[in-house]
Amino acid sequence: MRRPSAGLAGRVALVTGAARGLGASIAARLAEEGAAVVLCDLDEPGAADAARRLEESGARALALRCDVGVAQDVERTVRTAVAELGSLDILVNNAGITRDNLIHKMSDADWDLVSLVHLKGAFLCARAAQRPMVERSWGRIVNLSSTSALGTRGQANYSAAKAGLQGFTRALALELGRFGITVNCVAPGFIDTEMTRLTARRLGKDPGAYMTERAAGIAVGRVGTPADVANAVAFFASEEASFVSGQVLYVSGGPETRRGG
């Protein structure tokens, strides 16, 4: 972890789905900028481990169990964040799941669960988090979409949810801008994470070879890293991005004109 800067000193950030992967990387990056960070996840032990690592590096961190699809959980998480850390200035809606299948095999439950976590989860978290932001006349909401918003075979539920988050971002930007709150969206492409390596193994491929295969189709010639995504989130959370709102930034190593990973 790099030495903390003063960019977000005095700010409090809440990152959903922060026990591992992109969420943990985003939480660490915001902590590097000086923010106190609330890491929430259904996996409370995992979130606690991630928070402990941040604290060992000198950051203020708080781990909370939260089901983003349950309003009472979300409201309690926001209240606790404000009570324990003094405010809530930055929300990163990162929590997400996949339940991939072709449309003729996709169950109602798989459609509903993906929509619940991505769309309703982002709605519930934003609704709760905007209240303390409005009170302080400053806030940053960053939603995590995906290149899959452009359409991916076997991911009708996920693609629809990630596309919906882009519309949600633009609508909130229009509603909340007058209160000093910006709302933006980061849409990652293929990122080297534990999940993508598990996908490689499920396909019967060596993870390293799979990364090389995917990199061949990316303009910059490599796959993304969690840090690439975290850097984009940190920019949107910064004071320097105060005149940037309602935008979707594809972090995918090239222009996106078709389905992504």
Image (cartoon, rainbow, N blue to C red):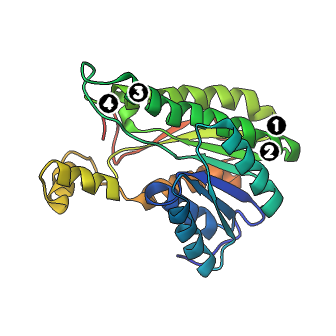
Residue highlighted by disc 3:
109
Q: Distance between the residues labelled 3 and 1?
A: 38 Å
Number of residue marks: 4
Q: How far apart are marks 2 and 1 (CA)?
A: 8 Å
**Residue 248 coordinates in the image, percent (x, y):** 51, 36
**Residue 103 coordinates in the image, percent (x, y):** 28, 21
Image mark for residue 133:
2
Tell me, yes or no, if residue 30 can be seen here: yes
The residue at 47%/38% (across/down) is: 145
Q: In this view, does 261 lie above or below 18?
A: above
Q: Which amino acid does label 4 sit on?
A: Gln
Q: Distance between the residues labelled 4 and 3?
A: 14 Å
Tell me, yes or no, if residue 193 can be seen here: no
**Residue 37 coordinates in the image, percent (x, y):** 66, 62
> Quick one: quadrant of the C terminus?
top left
Answer yes or no: do the residues labelled 2 and 1 have beta carbons within 8 Å? yes
